[in-house]
Amino acid sequence: MRISAKGEYAIKAMLDLALQRDRGLIPIQEIAARQGIPQRYLEQVLLSLKRAGLLTSKRGSTGGYHLTRRPEEITVGAVLRAVEGTPGPFD
């Protein structure tokens, strides 16, 4: 199975948010820097994940992103479906 760049970035971003979960809201700049993802592209990826209900966000200088569920409740399949928009054998 091949995973697109968008899918790979989504998985990396979700892993980063899971590892930083105790810190609260994580700014997109931090995720992009830690994971080596272009920030403009990451914005699109995180928006897809937010629309799928996997993330919440807050705008502003104290804003950022946060998982809506515990990390162990989120599957790679759910992440890939959120950004790829197609069902597949991901679970």
Image (cartoon, rainbow, N blue to C red):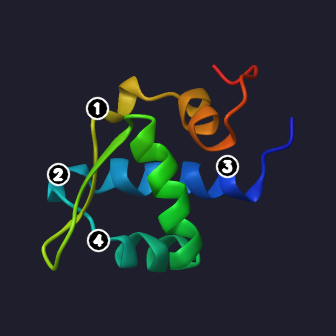
Residue type marked 1: Arg
Mark 2 or 4 closer to N-term? 2
Secondary structure of residue under mark 2: helix
Mark 3 or 2 closer to N-term? 3
Mark 4 or 1 closer to N-term? 4
Callout 3 environment at 10 Å: few (<14), some (14 to 19), or many (20+)?
A: many
Residue type marked 4: Pro
Secondary structure of residue under mark 1: loop
Please name which of the two marks, 2 or 4, marks the residue nearer to the observer: 4
Callout 1 environment at 10 Å: few (<14), some (14 to 19), or many (20+)?
A: few
Distance between mark 4 and mark 3 Cα atoms: 20 Å
Distance between mark 2 and mark 4 Cα atoms: 14 Å
Q: Which residue is mark 4?
A: 27
Distance between mark 3 and mark 1 Cα atoms: 20 Å
Secondary structure of residue under mark 4: loop
Question: Relative to 17, does residue 39 appear above or below in the rendering?
Answer: below
Q: Quadrant of the C terminus?
A: top right
Distance between mark 4 and mark 1 Cα atoms: 19 Å
Callout 2 environment at 10 Å: few (<14), some (14 to 19), or many (20+)?
A: few
Which numbered tag is attached to residue 7?
3
Q: Which residue is mark 2?
A: 22
Residue type marked 2: Asp
